[in-house]
Amino acid sequence: KAGVTQTPRYLIKTRGQQVTLSCSPISGHRSVSWYQQTPGQGLQFLFEYFSETQRNKGNFPGRFSGRQFSNSRSEMNVSTLELGDSALYLCASSRTGAPAGELFFGEGSRLTVL
Amino acid sequence: DQQVKQNSPSLSVQEGRISILNCDYTNSMFDYFLWYKKYPAEGPTFLISISSIKDKNEDGRFTVFLNKSAKHLSLHIVPSQPGDSAVYFCAASVGGSQGNLIFGKGTKLSVKP
C-alpha cells in the first residue's frame, strides 16, 4: 500500500512569490492535515480537510490556504512568501474511524525562501 | 505559550537499558495523547497513544504513562535498541480531533551500542 506522497520534495523560491504543494493521501483515507515544521517552533498545525471541506484551521495568516479534491488529494498554497516561511511542510492522512490523532505522514516538502 | 512541552532536547541511553521520555501539558481539555517517532529525512511515524481516561497503555517495548493530576506523560522504551535512535514527539488532541494535534518540540534519543 503506497504511503502519503508529497510533491515537490524540495523547492527554492524568492520573497514575494507564491508556492503550491501537493499531497496524495493513502488510498481510502479521506482526512488530510498539513503541518509546518521549523527548528524554532516545531510542528505546527496548519489545516485539516475532510471530504473537500476544511474542518479545522491553525493560527496562520491568510496567506496560507489549502483545498481538497474529490479524490482526497490536497494542495496547500502560500502566497507572498516571506523568509520565515522557509520550513518543512508535512502532509498527513488518516482513515475514517481511526483513533484520534493517528496520522500517517508523508516525507514532506522542504521550502526555502531566499 | 507552549501547551505541550518536552523539556529535554536530547537523551542518551545505553542499549538494553530503559529510555524514559517526558512530556508536560497545560491544557486540561486534551483528551488524547500520542507519541510519534521521526527519523531524519522521513515524516513522523505514529508510535503509541493513550486516552485521557486511562493512565497506562502498553505496546510491546513501548509503554505510555499518563498522570492527569500532574499534567504529565512519559514514554518508556524497554529494552532500548540502537534502532530506537530518533526524535520523539509528544502530541495532544482536544475534542477527539483527528488531524489537529498540538506537538511538543521533540526529544532526540540516542541509544548507544
Image (cartoon, coloured by chain):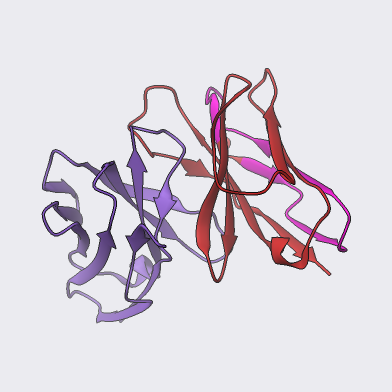
Chain colours: A red, B purple
Q: Nearer the viewer, residue A81 or A76?
A: A81
Q: Nearer the viewer, residue B91 or A60?
A: A60
Question: Residue A17 magenta-drawn?
Answer: yes
The percent position of residue A19, horizontal first and vertical second, equals 82, 49
Q: Say above or below: A113 vs B13.
A: above
Q: Nearer the viewer, residue B40 or A76?
A: A76
Q: Quadrant of residue B15?
A: bottom left
Q: Say above or below: A2 vs B71.
A: above
Image point (39%, 33%), residue name: B97
Q: Say above or below: A34 vs A55.
A: below
Image point (73%, 54%), residue name: A9
Q: How many marks?
A: 0
Residue A95 vs residue B40: left or right? Answer: left
Question: Residue B55 magenta-drawn?
Answer: no
Q: Quadrant of residue A101?
A: top left
> Which quadrant holds the N terminus of chain A?
top right
Residue A14 vs residue B75: left or right? Answer: right
**One can see residue B72 in this view:** yes
Image point (76%, 67%), residue name: A83
**One can see residue A1 in this view:** no
The percent position of residue A74, horizontal first and vertical second, equals 68, 32
The percent position of residue B106, horizontal first and vertical second, equals 40, 66
Magenta residue span: A5-32
Residue B76 vs residue A76: left or right? Answer: left
The percent position of residue B67, horizontal first and vertical second, equals 12, 55
Image point (84%, 70%), residue name: A114
